[in-house]
Image (spheres, rainbow, N blue to C red):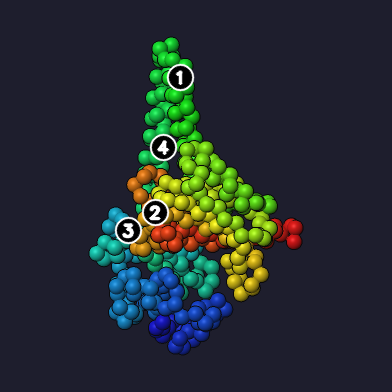
Amino acid sequence: MSVGTSSAPGAERTVRPPAPRPGDLADLGIDPDQLPDGLVVADEHGRVICFNAAAVRITAVPAEQALGRSLETALPLEDLEGRRWWQLTDPYGGLAIRVGQPERNLLLPGGREVLVSARYVRTRPTGPVRRVVVTLRDTEARRRTERSHAELIATVAHELRSPLTSVKGFTATLLAKWERFTDDQKRLMLETVDADADRVTRLIAELLDISRIDSGRLEVRRQPVDIGAAVGRHIQAHVAAGQPADRFLLRVQHPLPALWADPDKIDQVLSNLLENAVRHGEGTVTIDITPSASPRDREHAEPAATSVTVSDEGPGIPEESMNRVFTRFWRGSKRGGTGLGLYIVKGIVEAHGGTITVGRAPGGGAEFRFTLPVAAPAYLT
């Protein structure tokens, strides 16, 4: 941070740098270059006295070229309509009750878009502006978020279109030509409508889960969970749906510590991992349930967590894709799906205070392992 000398008589002592007041960066021991956002400060004459490293990175203007120059020259900003922002806002003139400018999108020379906000610092209410403090933020992170939201909307629209088209087509056909169909034909069409309605319901539930995960509002209602029995139910459901029973191998290492978790959400995790292994993997699907150290405290040898490992004997996940498995829209194959399931699984596991990893199974396929702490709810401890 480079600071100039104030020349206003009677306003401030002439020091270099200015004596810090409580709450100043210098008083807090913070170097402006350590701030993640760009910081530009101009004195009462509109001359730049601070131009930190993030501001240099965002504007591509060297600090030595900005310091000492007028704010309008060092930071020539325009709004999206091409108007010069400093002339438009006139920070040193205008109404004396103004305290600053809210964050907005502005343009640097060359058309690069940045998020800018300003604060007008006065020594007394309605007094002259002593400092103009400007913060700059790169819009790339926001653009990535906007692209992610747009991709989510496009994915949802695509996934909803197919089942809703089917539901609409079959119901319209049944209403128009009910007498022409046999009972078996009617049953087949109604079963298809029922399955497509379930598909829409699952997609809506996934969207609600994503919203709660992203906002940190995913609630976990802990109850005693028999994780071995829960896995057994999912295996039986796959067998009932036509999978051979010998395709699944369940191994439970006893004794297991008592597990307190949200049974519905754990079912969601197990359902997703087993379905992925069945759909995208090959050979035997092996589920190992073992006691383990807490995912947050591995120094203690006493088992304080339960680990569940789901592995298959398929082609596995390419090494270069491992770090993207738990991101939105990642798909391991072209066999359908929204690509949201594993993102939700990770969110659920972490909401329990657990961890989840992906790797290569001994048989060559994919291996997912999640570990949940077993502590009881706070009201029982």
Question: What separation in Å lies between label 3 and label 4 (alpha carbons)?
Answer: 39 Å
**Residue 102 sits in quarter:** bottom left
Q: Nearer the viewer, mark 2 or mark 3?
A: 2
Q: Nearer the viewer, mark 3 or mark 4?
A: 4
Mark 3, secondary structure of its residue: loop
- In this view, 119 is above or below 212: below
Amino acid on which the number 2 mark rests in the picture? Gly
Instruction: Residue under label 1, please give it.
Output: 184
Q: Earlier in the sequence, mark 3 or mark 1?
A: 3
Instruction: Residue under label 2, please give it.
Output: 314
Residue 7, how many percent across, how many down? 41, 84
Query: Residue 79's mark?
Result: 3
Q: Nearer the viewer, residue 366 or 74?
A: 366
Mark 2, secondary structure of its residue: loop
Instruction: Residue under label 4, please give it.
Output: 160
Q: Nearer the viewer, residue 46 or 39?
A: 39
Number of labelled discs?
4
- In this view, 18 is above or below 361: below
Question: What separation in Å lies between label 4 and label 1 (alpha carbons)?
Answer: 27 Å
Q: Nearer the viewer, mark 4 or mark 1?
A: 1
Question: What separation in Å lies between label 3 and label 1 (alpha carbons)?
Answer: 66 Å
